[in-house]
Image (spheres, helix red, strand yellow):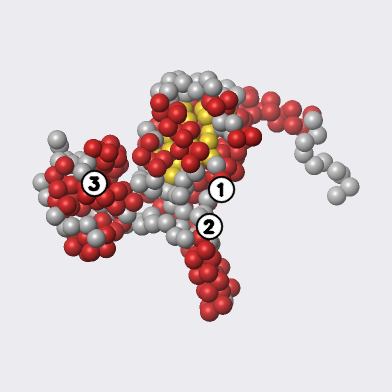
Amino acid sequence: MRAMSDYQDLQKAMKRVLPQLPPALQAVAAYFLEHPGKVATLSMRQVAAETGISAGNFPRLAKALGFDTYNDLRRVYSERVQDNGIGDYHLRAGALRDVAVDEGQAQVWSDFREAAHRNVDALFSSNALSRIVQVAEQLSAARTVYLVGMQASLSSAIYAKYLGSMLSERFRIVSGMGGIFADDITDLGEQDVLLAISLRPCSEYSIRIAQAAKARGARVIGCTDSDASPLALIADEVLQVPVKTPLFFDSYLAVTLLLELLLGFMTLQQGDVVERIESIEASRVALGEYWNNKEY
């Protein structure tokens, strides 16, 4: 097996072989998928001490992936320094409150601004232009684009449906209204694409829908916050979104921007989109959907 030098190729290979690895190597691989930044910046012994995994397992994983040494494997992560760990919401809420008490609201304001800039920059550095174009092409070519997002991700799925419907009638949301999901995916098949949005800890129903789509031969595109998330381990294409924020909850700023990027590039690829959008806008005006009270 030839060793891989590209980070995305390596992560895909890691996910592919993970189920076949011995338990100790599975633990190492899962850590690599979830914490590429620590793999890049910590020594092998430091990672072993932090995880409680024997240091001898790290070279074994490197060999299993086709690398001569652990350092060769680690070198692939050298430019990947973002830590994607999960925090506990209640602890994060307490930390936010403590900052406000100790350092004032100005510090909280500054922390939010810096986090927003970091997340936007990280989104573009984690997802190359070629990948965005490729995924947009897959969405454009699909018979139907199914959208799924549960819990906090529901609003993102609805937003994608709203934008997507202006481009094409082929967008369909998996809502599970009334607890019934099967009806929404009755026609899901090999010619379709499922765009799933789920951040850790992932919604069980989002993962189930992704598994069902995969089993039916549909292409699964995962928008998630870690290569080790359950969604990433299922998806054919993974678009990683940074979510770090001073808030007690994960930020959806990068998720929203990613969806706008995908729909924007779909717009470039579809010739009749201008006429469709013009028609929709004309219908909205005719139906009086926009505020037009001249007295204000």
Name the residue beneath numbered marker 3. Answer: 23
- Residue, far left: 68
Of the image marks 3 and 2, the number of the one nearer the N terminus: 3
Closer to us: 294 or 238:
238
- Where, quadrant-wise, is the N terminus in this rendering? top left
Kind of residue sitting beneath label 1? Ala
Tell me if residue 90 comes above or below residue 193 in the rendering: below
Q: Earlier in the sequence, mark 1 or mark 3?
A: 3
**Residues under numbered marks 1 and 2 in contact, where contact means CB atoms less than 8 Å apart:** yes
Left or right, residue 245 beside residue 45: right
Q: Is residue 68 visible?
A: yes
Q: CA distance from mark 1 to mark 2?
A: 9 Å
Q: Is residue 43 visible?
A: no
Residue 245 in the image, given as x and y percentages of width and height: 49, 60
Badge 1 or badge 2: first in the primary sequence = 1
Label 3 sits on a secondary structure element that is helix
**Pointer 2: what residue?**
249
In the structure shown, which secondary structural element does the residue marked by tag 2 occupy?
Answer: loop
